[in-house]
Image (cartoon, rainbow, N blue to C red):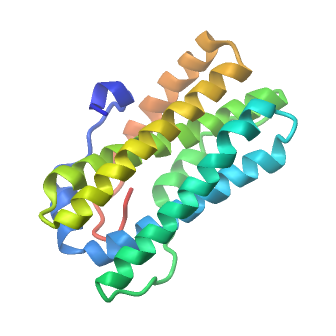
Amino acid sequence: MEKNLLGLRLPTDPRWVNIAEKNIDEILIDHAYCEQKAASSCISLIVQYPDKELLVEMLTPVVAEEWSHFERVLEQLQKRGYKLGKQRKDEYVIALNKHIKKGGSREQQLVEKLLVNALIEARSCERFKILWKKIPDKELQQFYYELMVSEAGHYKNFLQLARQYMDPDKVQDRWNEFLQIEAEILKGLKVRHDRMH
């Protein structure tokens, strides 16, 4: 799960983990909604592309896993006496979605969505790794280690599916473009105390 393996062009700002550690309740609340949205995103892809057998086969267990993560984050909140607060606007995901190309074939639209999902999973994986290595809470360390491994698998699933439905060289070119876009988005976002991304 090293930076070069994930392909991310810009590492997370080192200040983020210090801010996250001091506001772990806010991070856990935002994280819960991230898991919920990840499950919803996979359900949406299955509903939109039921004819893509491999996609349905690969993403169905991901839905269950993401929902299980949501439940586990809720458990961590409850253990610490926190409640699930209101959902926050995810500026990072909104910015990424603005770069999805409109038009093209049905497969091109699918690949755009798969690559955005892969990016979100890659960035989540990178942040979980930081939390695993840096925060002092031993239970949360183990929790985020397990989630890091899981998100790395989801990231690979999305990229594999994209390469299944379009020429792998074209997918790689578009992936490289998205990696650069993501780095620019991250540069422009404020380091927030209450956001996973």
x then y, percent, for residue 21:
19, 67
Count of all numbered marks drawn on residues in the image = 0
Vertical placement of residue 31 versus 44, above or below: below
Image position of 48 with respect to 51: above or below: below
Residue 76 vertical placement versus 35 (above, below): below
User: As drawn, is 5 to the left or to the right of 16?
Assistant: right
- The N terminus lies in quadrant: top left
Q: Is residue 104 left or right of residue 93?
A: right
Q: Which residue lies at the image location 51% right of the left edge and 31% below the top edge?
A: 156
Q: Which residue is rendered at x = 23% and y = 49% of the image?
A: 130
Question: Is 41 positioned to the left or the right of 195 in the image?
Answer: right
* Residue 112 percent location from the top left of the image: 66, 34
Q: Quadrant of residue 136?
A: bottom left
| Quarter of the picture holding the C terminus | bottom left
For this view, does 144 lie left or right of residue 43? left
Frontmost residue, 4 versus 75: 75
Identify the residue at image location x=57%, y=64%.
36
Query: Where residue 111 sits in the image (x, y, percent)?
Result: 68, 30
